[in-house]
Image (spheres, coloured by chain):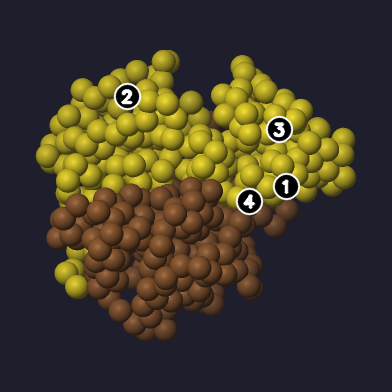
Chain colours: A yellow, B brown
Amino acid sequence: MGKLYVVGIGPGSYENMTIRAVKAMEESTVIAGYTVYCDLVRPHFPDKEYLSTPMMGEEKRVRMALEKSAGGETVALVCSGDAGVYGLAGLAFELEKEFNGVEVEVIPGVTAAISGGALLGAPLIHDFCLISLSDRLTPIETIEKRLRAAAAADMVIVLYNPESKSRSGYLKRAAEVLLETIDGSRICGIASNIAREGEGYRVMTLEDLLTAQADMFCTVFIGNSSTTVIDGHMVTPRGYKSER
Amino acid sequence: MGKLYVVGIGPGSYENMTIRAVKAMEESTVIAGYTVYCDLVRPHFPDKEYLSTPMMGEEKRVRMALEKSAGGETVALVCSGDAGVYGLAGLAFELEKEFNGVEVEVIPGVTAAISGGALLGAPLIHDFCLISLSDRLTPIETIEKRLRAAAAADMVIVLYNPESKSRSGYLKRAAEVLLETIDGSRICGIASNIAREGEGYRVMTLEDLLTAQADMFCTVFIGNSSTTVIDGHMVTPRGYKSER
């Protein structure tokens, strides 16, 4: 019986993959995933069979990978960042039972909060939360409730999927919700195209976020009340008590 | 002038390091850090000078590494997990200005929420937050406020530093706070000694968490209202709407 690795490949570059991710792909005969992610790994693993699925639902993609595994192949289903953070690892476990005997193993990877945080400086030194602004599978009321809760509890907030072609204005709306609780001078940051061509970051205020340009290749960071800018970097201190 | 890499080495094993982390350590002449983490990397980079600091404050450790960099060395300051998540990256930026000309670069790594999540299954597929139970630098009232906020907003919660020798009973107290809002049957999990000897995981309920054994090598996961157990794994679905 085959094996399905659900592999987090990190933000995109080979260097940001873990050694374990590389080994899992080397060991696999088939690499499956969304076209963009397949294209990111193909140059490094050219001799594999690719199941590259551009316009397909997530369930169909996972099912295809599981079918290949059930046929005896070792398959690496690749996800950007970490496979367990808004990734396909959950669906793999949910669908596994339909493919008797396939073993699913999740290979952890560097998610955009982590790689984007490193690019911006050190915004995540203290408690933080990840919230996706995509309302494709989550009611917008739930998303806004979480934004308000995180702001009231003074947690650093990382926004995934801030905008896309079909969802414009979502980042502005999130900033408006946060401004109900948080002052406009709060330090924020945007990391773009992490570990890919055009990589960059911008440090700004929450007020600036209302009009900031963002797309699906951006990850947005809202600091906590202690977050500061040091030499152009976004830095959150370790704690609130001073103990040095 | 020298360079300081602040390197997240992941949960512990060589395989869970990124290629970029390995390269940064290869390039460095000095590897600095807490004894336990130095011991984890030493077998893979035996020919380095080690500044291993067992009983020293965090600021002193970072300062020592920056001093070495200022003297012209390339230094890798190693942190477990990610250097930016409760790690030393923040202090490195805060202290950098005292060491004129040292360049600080953060190398992202796989933090315990990610590696522990992969071990447990896929608990972090939807919005989640990281909260440290250590009140060494944060008032316990702030920690409990965050627990209540995350529970009310139905986010998955990952607890870092649940217990230590000097802080026993903290996990029980956190469970009590969460039980104010969340039903005792909520799915929870504990990942232990991730990627090290004695690695393991337990899936349980929030009620069980009241009496669960935990130590500083444990990471604790509290599911959201949709989290389920599939074949012994802790799995959170991608969203609340069903769209397949």
Chain label for disc 1: A
Q: Is mark 3 on a helix, strand or loop?
A: strand
Q: Mark 2 points at which residue?
A: A214
The tag on residue A104 is 1
At label 4, counting other C-alpha atoms closer than 10 Å, the crowd grade (few under 14, some 14-19, many 20 or more) is: many
| Image quadrant occupied by the C terminus of chain A | bottom left
Earlier-in-chain disc, 1 versus 3: 3
Q: What element carries label 4?
A: helix
| x and y, in percent, of residue B68 in the image | 28, 66
Please indicate, yes or no, whether residue A156 appears anywhere in the rendered image.
Answer: no
Q: Mark 3 points at which residue?
A: A31
Tell me whether circle 3 and circle 4 mark residues in contact (CB < 8 Å): no
Position above or below: B21 against A70: below
Q: Which of marks 1 and 3 is in front?
A: 3
Q: Is mark 2 on a helix, strand or loop?
A: loop
Position above or below: B106 against A6: below
Earlier-in-chain disc, 2 versus 3: 3
| Image quadrant occupied by the N terminus of chain A | top right
Earlier-in-chain disc, 2 versus 1: 1
At label 2, counting other C-alpha atoms closer than 10 Å, the crowd grade (few under 14, some 14-19, many 20 or more) is: many
- Estimate the spatial distance between the alpha carbons at disc 3 and disc 4, rounded to whole Å: 15 Å
- Estimate the spatial distance between the alpha carbons at disc 2 and disc 3, rounded to whole Å: 30 Å
Q: Which amino acid type is marked by label 1?
A: Val
Tell me whether circle 1 and circle 4 mark residues in contact (CB < 8 Å): no
The tag on residue A20 is 4
Chain label for disc 2: A
Chain label for disc 4: A
Earlier-in-chain disc, 4 versus 2: 4
